[in-house]
Amino acid sequence: MNMVVHAFLATVWCLTNHGANDMTTRPLIGLPGRRKAGRDVAGMLTTFADMQIDLYFANYAKGVIAAGGLPVHLPIDVDPLLIIDRLDGLLLTGGTDIEPSLYGAESETDIYPPEPERDDLELGLFKGAVHRQIPVLGICRGQQIVNVGAGGTLHQDVPPHSGVGHAVDAELHEVTLEPDSILRELYGASVWVNSLHHQAVDTVGEDLRVTGWSDDDVAEGLEHTSLPIVCVQWHPEMMPTRDTDPIFSWLVEAAGRG
């Protein structure tokens, strides 16, 4: 029993005298995920078929950790306006399509059905982040959430004959980055990226500008004109040639500046 108590006290001491100091210097980055029923999750026991399960792709958190931040997974139920006050930065991740009515359109495709609860959470988080002026990184769907949150619209299905492969099985393609942009500072004049999307920015939202273009004029990067908000349509967390993508470093460093 004494050994257990001593081990517990040693752990508390480490957290309060070492780990706590380290944690207070590392920016907290919120990462929303998605929610599915157990029956829809591969490999889940039938016992859990009716249970709700929150899912998060590990590579996003790994990118934040590698850049020096602390990832905080956000469940669907969390109040976005309450949690945003505890965060130093926000990472809006990839996922399913956004409900078209949120940008004044009717559904034209059901390839990836929307998840209304996730839409509501992420739009609330984005608006809270804008209000607090904390850094936001949007990846794939995250770019689309930012655009819709700023009043923009989306192409619901990028044509397969557009000239550049944007589907899941597409090869790497080049993105040209605009001068005087954060993306240009991070990657140079252009960057070769993956592509895992079938939707894209159409009308650009208020106070946003396109800072990355594919050869077929799909908006591959968005930035806010005055706030620390950067988005990419590709998946930097999945690029095999980079151990730590510079865009995660940008997010964590910007969040650390407070």
Image (cartoon, rainbow, N blue to C red):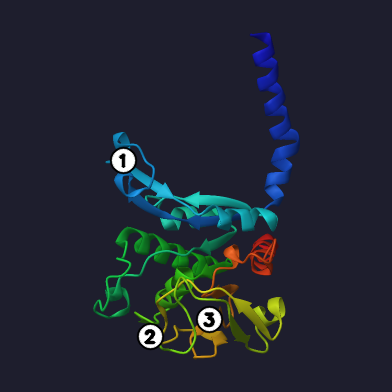
Per the model, the C-alpha gap separating discs 1 and 3 is 37 Å
Q: In this picture, is 29 found above or below 102?
A: above
Q: Please identify the quarter of the rendering in which residue 177 is found.
A: bottom right
Q: Residue at x 55, y 75 (%)?
A: 232
Considering depth in this image, is 132 or 222 the residue closer to the camera? 222
Q: Amino acid at mark 2?
A: Pro
- The image position of residue 255, as x and y in percent, is 64, 62
Determine whether the residue tagged by mark 2 lies in a helix, strand or loop: loop
Considering depth in this image, is 132 or 235 the residue closer to the camera? 235
Q: In this picture, is 161 found above or below 242?
A: below
- The image position of residue 94, as x and y in percent, is 47, 65
Determine whether the residue tagged by mark 1 lies in a helix, strand or loop: loop
Classify residue 218 as left or right of residue 10: left
Say few, some or many: other residues with alpha carbon within 10 Å of mark 3 (under 14 / 14 to 19 / 20 or more): many
Q: Which residue is mark 2?
A: 159
- The image position of residue 56, as x and y in percent, is 48, 52
Q: Please identify the quarter of the rendering in which residue 158 is found.
A: bottom left
Mark 1 vs 2, N-terminal side: 1
Q: Which residue is mark 3?
A: 220
Quarter of the image that includes the N terminus: top right
Q: Which residue is mark 1?
A: 51
Classify residue 193 as left or right of residue 36: right
Mark 1 vs 3, N-terminal side: 1
- The image position of residue 218, as x and y in percent, is 48, 86
Determine whether the residue tagged by mark 3 lies in a helix, strand or loop: strand
Classify residue 195 as left or right of residue 102: right
Q: Amino acid at mark 1?
A: Met
Q: Residue at x 46, y 84 (%)?
A: 206
Q: Amino acid at mark 3?
A: Glu
Mark 2 vs 3, N-terminal side: 2
